[in-house]
């Protein structure tokens, strides 16, 4: 099936099988390796990408569902060499350790800020439920998201 | 990796039912895919055809049923996110909005659907437990016509429903609680899916012009417990024990109700805990849910925080 999808701002026409998962199309066909396959069951958040602004688990999302929609991966967050405020805040807060969860955390936080520009700490914890990090203990990630919210505002 | 399949995208329920009737066991109904695709990846289900129901007219709509008073109607392909953000749901069934906000995680809520959740009959479903207290009915469509079942009749056991292979779950209808009803939903668990969940609703005597916060007597109680046994259950014994109790002696009635609930559920020993432990926790959380509902009946929002629990 041919799908028309805008990936990180760039329109693409892609030939995909009905059973192709969005994660495989992004990683293998488009060489965008930021979204990771980890739990493969929508539990961990490492494969999170935004489809029309909404966070989805690309590991359990058919690529054909992205037809006519726009997909944002972590590769599309920065503007050229200028990091997105969330990325900068993650660096400054020390919210990145091994980095495996980071792309999902960034995109989930971006989706949240689009809905809620003034999140409380509880709002951030609620939205990031199901985004797992095995290094940081989450505190610095939440700090970074709150700091970025201040910057964006 | 998924095995290959043919994707069908009917635009009417008739067309979808005809496909299902033609394809029989080779077909699976597909909406958000949050349950189906997982089982397909594991090879537990191997359908050669997926019938996508998201394009069927009305399937993604939230509205009211035509009868007098209007029940809340959720199209089968309505997402958890849509339920969470619907002003109509918030107005008619506010606890449904709150619970929708806590289903799984944000990614699942964005694509997972109400119909898929119920039709999969995963025993750890938040919605099924809550919907039992709202006298939910489900609409099943097939080439033979339409039938309506109560949610209790529909969910037969773990991953098992009364839906025939050529039937399609079209919508779910909920009966909003009467005014003067206060409710709470509490779920507990350390894994991704809840170990147990309790929905409790208390309708208070609004007589003598006392108003919502002046009323003291429970005239109707609803208690459902889910996620802990093969299927969610309403606990009629607990509801009877709460009826006519006053909020002042809620503790005695709640204790009796919690013991009835613990006796009613049918837990198994598994990774979520031993059956005995789960029974004990059911009693604990039934009491907690009732205390929260009672506090809300008095117009207070208790600062209820329990480890590994979500209060909605």
Image: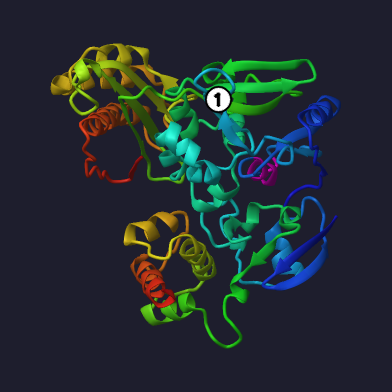
In the picture, measured across the screen, residue A63 lies left or right of residue B261, that is right
**Quadrant where the image shows the C terminus of chain A:** bottom left
Reply above or below: B151 against B237.
Answer: below
At x 38%, y 78%, the residue is A94
Where is mark 1, residue-wise? B173
The picture places residue B109, in percent across and down from the top left corner, at: 53, 47
Report which quarter residue B299 is drawn in.
top left
Q: B49 or A114: which is nearer to us?
A: A114
Would you call the spot at circle 1 few (<14 residues within 10 Å), some (14-19), or many (20 or more)?
many
Q: How many marks?
A: 1
Give the magenta range. Answer: B36-43
Image location of residue B309, percent across then percent down = 33, 43
**Taken as a whole, is the magenta stretch helix, strand or loop?**
helix
- Residue A142 image offset from top left, x and y in percent: 37, 67
B70 in magenta = no
> Which type of secondary structure does the marked residue at label 1 adopt?
strand
In which quadrant will I find the N terminus of chain A? bottom right
User: Residue furthest toward the front?
Assistant: B209
Q: Quadrant of residue A75?
A: bottom right
Residue furthest bottom as drawn: A81
Q: Position of residue B18 (x, y in %)?
A: 83, 26
Whether residue B180 is visible to the viewer of this picture, yes or no, is yes
Q: Is residue A31 visible?
A: no
Picture quadrant where residue A27 is located: bottom right
């Amino acid at each position: 099936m041919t799908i028309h999808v805008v990936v990180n701002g760039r329109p693409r026409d892609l030939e995909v099988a009905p059973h192709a998962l969005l994660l495989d199309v992004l990683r293998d066909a488009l060489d965008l390796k930021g979204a990771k396959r980890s739990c493969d069951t929508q539990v961990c958040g490492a494969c999170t990408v935004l489809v029309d602004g909404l966070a989805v688990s690309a590991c359990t999302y058919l690529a054909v569902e992205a037809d006519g929609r726009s997909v944002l991966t972590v590769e599309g967050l920065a503007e050229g060499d200028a990091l997105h405020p969330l990325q900068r805040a993650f660096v400054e807060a020390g919210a990145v350790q091994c980095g495996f969860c980071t792309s999902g955390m960034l995109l989930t936080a971006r989706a949240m800020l689009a809905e809620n520009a003034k999140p409380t700490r509880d709002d951030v914890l609620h939205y990031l439920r199901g985004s797992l990090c095995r290094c940081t203990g989450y505190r610095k990630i939440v700090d970074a998201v709150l700091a970025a919210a201040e910057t964006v505002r | 990796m998924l095995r290959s399949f043919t994707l069908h995208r009917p635009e009417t329920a008739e067309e979808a039912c005809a496909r299902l009737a033609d394809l029989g066991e080779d077909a699976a109904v597909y909406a958000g895919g949050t349950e189906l695709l997982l089982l397909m990846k594991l090879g537990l289900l191997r359908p050669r055809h997926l019938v996508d129901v998201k394009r069927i007219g009305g399937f993604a709509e939230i509205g009211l049923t035509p009868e007098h008073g209007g029940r809340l109607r959720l199209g089968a392909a309505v997402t958890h996110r849509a339920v969470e953000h619907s002003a109509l749901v918030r107005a008619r069934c506010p606890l449904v909005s709150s619970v929708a906000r806590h289903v799984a995680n944000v990614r699942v809520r964005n694509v997972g659907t109400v119909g898929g959740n119920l039709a999969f009959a995963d025993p750890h479903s938040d919605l099924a437990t809550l919907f039992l207290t709202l006298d939910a009915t489900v609409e099943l469509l097939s080439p033979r016509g339409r039938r309506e079942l109560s949610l209790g009749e529909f969910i037969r056991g773990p991953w098992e429903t009364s839906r025939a292979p050529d039937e399609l779950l079209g919508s779910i209808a909920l009966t909003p609680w009467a005014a003067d009803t206060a409710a709470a939903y509490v779920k507990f668990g350390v894994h991704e899916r809840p170990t147990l969940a309790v929905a409790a609703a208390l309708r208070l005597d609004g007589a003598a012009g006392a108003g919502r916060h002046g009323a003291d007597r429970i005239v109707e109680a609803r208690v459902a417990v889910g996620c802990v046994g093969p299927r969610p259950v309403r606990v009629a014994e607990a509801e009877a024990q709460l009826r006519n109790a006053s909020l002042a002696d809620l503790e005695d009635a709640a204790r009796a109700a919690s013991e009835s609930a613990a006796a009613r559920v049918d837990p198994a020993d598994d990774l979520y805990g031993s059956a005995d432990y789960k029974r004990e926790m059911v009693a604990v959380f039934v009491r907690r849910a009732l205390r929260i509902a009672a506090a809300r009946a008095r117009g207070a929002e208790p600062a209820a925080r329990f480890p590994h629990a979500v209060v909605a």
